[in-house]
Image (spheres, rainbow, N blue to C red):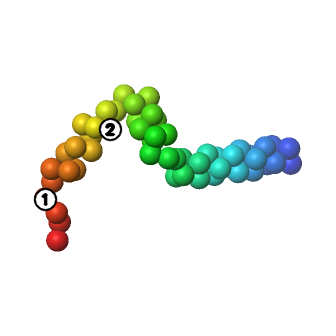
């Protein structure tokens, strides 16, 4: 039973490390990731550029 808990703890640590890595992507890496997900960053973010500033 302790092996099971140890494996779960290891997986939790790996999951946390993956989430941390996602937060520290460079712009180039983020663009590549979005494209791999089928999202065109130029089109997605162009809309934000057209929106009026919120006050």
Residue drawn 78% across the image and 43% down it: 7
Q: Secondary structure at mark 2?
A: helix
Q: Are marks 1 and 2 in contact (CB under 8 Å)?
A: no
11 or 26, which lies in front? 26
Residue drawn 61% across the image and 46% down it: 18
Q: Is residue 31 left or right of residue 16?
A: left
Residue 1 in view: no
Q: Is residue 3 left or right of residue 13?
A: right
The quarter of the picture where the N terminus appears is top right
Q: Quadrant of residue 31?
A: top left
In the rendered image, the residue lying farthest to the bottom is 55
Q: What is the distance, in whole Å, between disc 1 and disc 2 at their CAs?
A: 19 Å
50 or 20, which lies in front? 50
The residue tagged 1 is 52
Is 21 situated above or below 31? below
Residue 38 in view: yes
In the rendered image, the residue lying farthest to the right is 2
Give how far across and how far down residue 17 sits, in percent: 65, 50
Q: Secondary structure at mark 1?
A: loop
The disc at residue 11 is: none
Q: Residues within 10 Å of mark 2 (few under 14, many from 20)?
A: some
Q: Residues within 10 Å of mark 1 (few under 14, many from 20)?
A: few
Residue drawn 13% across the image and 59% down it: 52
Give how far across and how far down residue 46 sits, in percent: 22, 43
Residue drawn 24% across the image and 37% down it: 43
The residue tagged 2 is 41
The quarter of the picture where the C terminus appears is bottom left
Q: Earlier in the sequence, mark 1 or mark 2?
A: 2
Q: Is residue 11 left or right of residue 18?
A: right
Give how far across and how far down residue 34 sits, in percent: 40, 36
Q: Is residue 13 left or right of residue 3?
A: left
């Amino acid at each position: 039973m302790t092996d099971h808990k140890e494996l779960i703890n290891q997986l939790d640590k790996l999951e946390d490390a993956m989430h941390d890595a996602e937060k520290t992507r460079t712009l180039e890496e983020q663009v590549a990731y979005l494209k791999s997900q089928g999202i065109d960053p130029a089109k997605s973010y162009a809309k934000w550029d057209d929106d009026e500033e919120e006050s």
